[in-house]
Amino acid sequence: MRKMTSSVSTNPSTLLPLELVDKCIGSRIHIIMKNDKEIVGTLLGFDDFVNMLLEDVTESEATPEGRRVTKLDQILLNGNNITMLVPGGDMPDT
């Protein structure tokens, strides 16, 4: 994994998607996966395919028995399975 660096203006209307993700390194991020799992963690790095490395992770998944929450030290996410990123987001209470 590598950290991206950019010298582009910080005007949000001119940011490219990977530049926005780059600005989230070191911050909490809420990720919704294709399989309806939700993950919140601190973004450590990512690559051009948006594979992401996070630490201090909380993973939430809806099961027939109810919501299952798992705490993890680190996780490596495959960018192909990411549906949505919410910078600075927290896990919803519902």
Image (cartoon, rainbow, N blue to C red):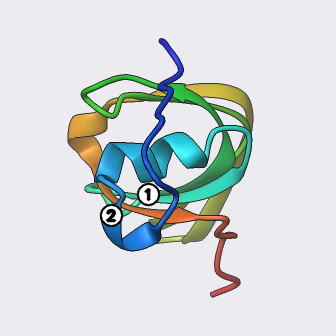
Identify residue type, mark 2: Thr
- Image coordinates for residue 29, horizontal then vertical, percent: 61, 55
Mark 2 and mark 1: Cα distance apart in space:
31 Å
- Image coordinates for residue 78, horizontal then vertical, percent: 33, 30
Residue drawn 45% across the image and 53% down it: 20
Is disc 2 in contact with disc 1, using a CB cutoff of under 8 Å?
no
Tell me if 79 is positioned left or right of 28 in this view.
left
Is residue 59 in sight in this rendering? no
Please tell me in which quadrant of the rendered image residue 79 appears.
Answer: top left
Callout 2: SS: helix
| Residue pointed to by mark 1 | 37
Mark 2: give few (<14), some (14-19) or many (20+) Cα within 10 Å.
Answer: few
Callout 1: SS: loop
N-terminal of the pair, mark 2 or mark 1, is: 2
Residue drawn 26% across the image and 43% down it: 81
Is residue 91 in sight in this rendering? yes
Mark 1: give few (<14), some (14-19) or many (20+) Cα within 10 Å.
Answer: some
Identify residue type, mark 1: Lys
- Image coordinates for residue 93, horizontal then vertical, percent: 70, 84
- Image coordinates for residue 43, horizontal then vertical, percent: 63, 38
Mark 2 vs mark 1, foreground winner is 2
The disc placed on residue 14 is 2
Q: Quadrant of the C terminus?
A: bottom right
7, above or below 64, in the image: above
